[in-house]
Image (spheres, rainbow, N blue to C red):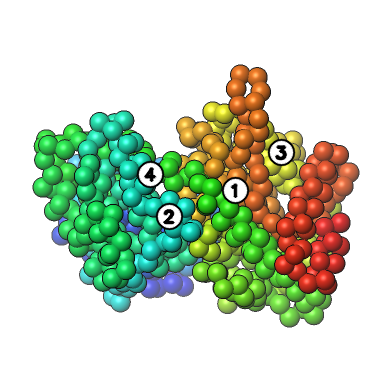
């Protein structure tokens, strides 16, 4: 064994290699997704985690006859290094100089004329085409094979079986019939008579359905085909309660077994099928006959329709932020009182925060697994405390706490970096620079047509001036009682053609991470709203939705401008005004002191 401490991982890799000869392949690639190309997946599809032990939400494992590697992004560099220790898998850090692409890695290790195996249901059609193009230059081809883990993975969890439920109109604000009409109008722009939806959040939004198939993401495993006169939902029939089935019939949606999607698509003829090859898996895409149908490649119209909140959804998320803020304030009061005792740990504060949120009857669970990273663990961007890593908290240094909740009227996502006591000058400087970046983006006003990539620099500039940076995005879209990460909008250095529009909810979360020392991130959710007319047209701005005080103990006041200090005072006044009616007298007094 290469490293010896995790023999089960090496045994699994060797078991996978045992099928190479039978399949006539020289390598196999396992991404961390499912047939719907989801970021977070049901246990049944956690194949990459099973083969490698790496639990992050982004990453891809490549196994050749002699080597194995994991490619992941900067959010998971430290986590992956820890989780891969003791395995024969090498970590490859994406976007860093000297890191080979998967295609380059394979071209250097397997001979021309050989094949690389994939399970086509877990790769987008676009990803397969790109990989084929890159490998064909080296005489290497891609071969689709049936998922070998179906037989190799002993005790593999079954497909999700939880029943679906209807998302009530008082929260959705728009009925499924109206949504489908809007979608059909959008389809006509592409002269398409059929739309294939694979993304689970898009299907859930369209049909006003919610479920429990994916941890923290209230979606239902299914496919949806919308035609000009009818629609077809492919779903495990056990998920269809009488109430859900009745609503679907009312909407004109016919239901079929989940596994019938491939055969149904194969029988289509004379259609103009609209789909997004970046969000449709290769096996499903390949089931549609290009000879008998016109396939239109375009982003799903549902993606943008879903991203622009209606008035009911906007009011709902404001209510969700208010009740979430009350829970967070009560948690912060508890944390301040208990830290001096020295009995709390990362995992205990995670549990306590959930307890405070659970006190409200509308709480439906976390929107993602809480990240509670103390001191050096805060530098692990998507850290998850385990019994082995669980650090005890003491009255010094920073606790980075990234958490969120699901409510029927909104999804929350908030990060606070909390000073537990004594801080170094370096920590206070870093904290203040991150805060300056957060405030700069929060105060931005910009003309209509602006993209997130054009605003990203605002959050980074205070750090860049000190030759520091972070490699994750500054902002992501957030679903409405759906996935905590949703598009199409984003705020990041990478170019994204989607423009920011009124009604879009986006995070604002700059950070800084210093390995072995500390991590800092400050995150609020924002709503794009009109800012009035100006030169050459209308202007937009961000309304901060999150209602929770920002820790002031780490701030170096001399580094803030008067405008920045004024923004913070105004924000804290808003937090107090919105939360005070729900707080006790003692809690209100604490909140006033904490915001100073």
Query: In x, y percent, where is residue 183?
Result: 34, 42
Dot 4 alpha-carbon crowd within 10 angstroms: few under 14, some 14 to 19, many 20 or more: many
On the image, which quarter does residue 470 sit in? top right
Residue at the extreme top: 536
Residue 117 versus residue 43 in the image, above or below = above
Which one is in front, 310 or 350? 310
Badge 3 density bin: few <14, some 14–19, many ≥20, Cα 10 Å? some
Q: Which residue is mark 3?
A: 443
Distance between mark 3 and mark 4 Cα atoms? 30 Å
Which of discs 2 and 1 lies nearer the camera? The answer is: 1
CA gap between label 2 and label 1 equals: 17 Å
Asked which quadrant contains residue 130, the reply is top left
Quick one: label 1 or label 4, which is nearer the N terminus?
Answer: 4
Q: Is residue 474 visible?
A: yes
Residue drawn 89% across the image and 44% down it: 558
**Residue 302, labelled with which disc?**
4
Assess disc 2: are there few (<14), some (14-19) or many (≥20) residues with their C-alpha within 10 Å of its C-alpha. Answer: some
Q: Which residue is mark 2?
A: 39
Distance of label 1 from label 4 (alpha carbons): 21 Å
On-image quarter of the N terminus:
bottom left
Residue lying furthest right: 558
Say which of 584 and 483 sits in front. Answer: 584
Q: Which residue is mark 1?
A: 507
Comparing labels 3 and 2, the label whose residue is closer to the camera: 3
Residue in view at x 53 percent, y 64 percent:
407
The location of residue 245, given as percent across then percent down, is 27, 65
């Amino acid at each position: 064994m290469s490293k010896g401490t995790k023999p089960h991982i090496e045994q699994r890799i060797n078991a996978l290699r045992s099928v190479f000869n039978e399949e006539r392949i020289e390598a196999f690639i396992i991404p961390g997704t499912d047939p719907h190309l989801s970021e977070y997946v049901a246990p049944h599809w956690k194949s990459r985690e099973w083969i490698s032990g790496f639990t992050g939400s982004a990453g891809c494992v490549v196994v050749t006859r002699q080597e194995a590697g994991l490619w992941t992004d900067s959010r998971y560099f430290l986590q992956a290094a820890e989780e891969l220790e003791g395995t024969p898998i090498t970590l490859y850090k994406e976007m860093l100089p000297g890191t080979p692409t998967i295609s380059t890695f394979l071209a250097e290790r397997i001979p021309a004329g050989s094949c690389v195996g994939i399970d086509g249901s877990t790769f987008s059609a676009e990803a397969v085409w790109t990989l084929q193009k890159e490998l064909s230059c080296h005489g290497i081809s891609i071969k689709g094979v049936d998922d070998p883990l179906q037989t190799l993975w002993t005790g593999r969890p079954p497909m999700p079986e939880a029943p679906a439920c209807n998302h009530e109109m008082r929260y959705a604000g728009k009925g499924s019939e109206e949504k489908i009409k809007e979608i059909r109008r959008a389809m006509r722009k592409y002269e398409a008579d059929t739309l294939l939806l694979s993304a689970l959040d898009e299907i859930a939004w369209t049909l006003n359905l919610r479920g429990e198939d994916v941890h923290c993401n209230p979606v239902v495993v299914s496919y949806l085909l919308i035609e000009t006169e009818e629609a077809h939902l492919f779903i495990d029939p056990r998920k269809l309660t009488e109430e859900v089935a009745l609503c679907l019939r009312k909407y004109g949606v016919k239901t079929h077994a989940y596994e019938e999607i491939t055969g149904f698509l194969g029988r289509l003829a004379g259609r103009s099928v609209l789909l997004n090859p970046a969000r449709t898996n290769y096996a499903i895409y390949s089931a549609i006959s290009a000879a008998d149908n016109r396939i239109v490649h375009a982003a799903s119209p549902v993606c943008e329709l879903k991203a622009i909140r209606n008035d009911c959804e906007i009011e709902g998320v404001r209510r969700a932020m208010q009740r979430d803020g009350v829970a967070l304030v009560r948690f912060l009061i508890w944390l301040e009182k208990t830290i001096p005792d020295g009995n709390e740990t990362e995992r205990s504060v995670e549990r306590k925060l959930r307890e405070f949120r659970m006190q409200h009857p509308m709480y439906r669970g976390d929107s993602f697994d809480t990240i509670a990273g103390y001191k050096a663990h805060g530098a692990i961007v998507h850290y998850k405390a385990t019994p082995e890593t669980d650090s005890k908290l003491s009255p010094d240094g920073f606790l980075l706490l990234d958490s969120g909740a699901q409510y029927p009227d909104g999804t929350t996502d908030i990060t606070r970096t909390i000073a537990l006591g004594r801080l170094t000058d370096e920590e206070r400087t870093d904290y203040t620079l991150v805060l300056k970046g957060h405030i700069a983006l929060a105060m931005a006003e910009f003309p209509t047509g602006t993209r997130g990539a054009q605003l990203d620099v605002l959050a980074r500039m205070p750090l860049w001036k000190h030759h520091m940076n972070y490699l994750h995005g500054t902002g992501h879209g957030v679903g409405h009682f759906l996935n905590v990460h949703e598009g199409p909008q984003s705020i990041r250095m990478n170019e994204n053609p989607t423009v920011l529009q009124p009604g879009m909810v986006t995070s604002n979360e700059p950070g800084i991470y210093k390995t072995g020392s500390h991590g800092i991130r400050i995150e609020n959710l924002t709503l794009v709203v009109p800012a009035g007319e100006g030169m050459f047209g209308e202007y937009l701005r961000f309304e901060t939705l999150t209602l929770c005080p920002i820790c002031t103990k780490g701030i170096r006041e001399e580094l803030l401008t008067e405008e920045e200090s004024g923004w913070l005072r105004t924000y804290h006044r808003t937090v107090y005004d919105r939360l005070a009616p729900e707080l006790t007298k003692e809690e209100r007094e604490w909140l006033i002191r904490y915001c100073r």
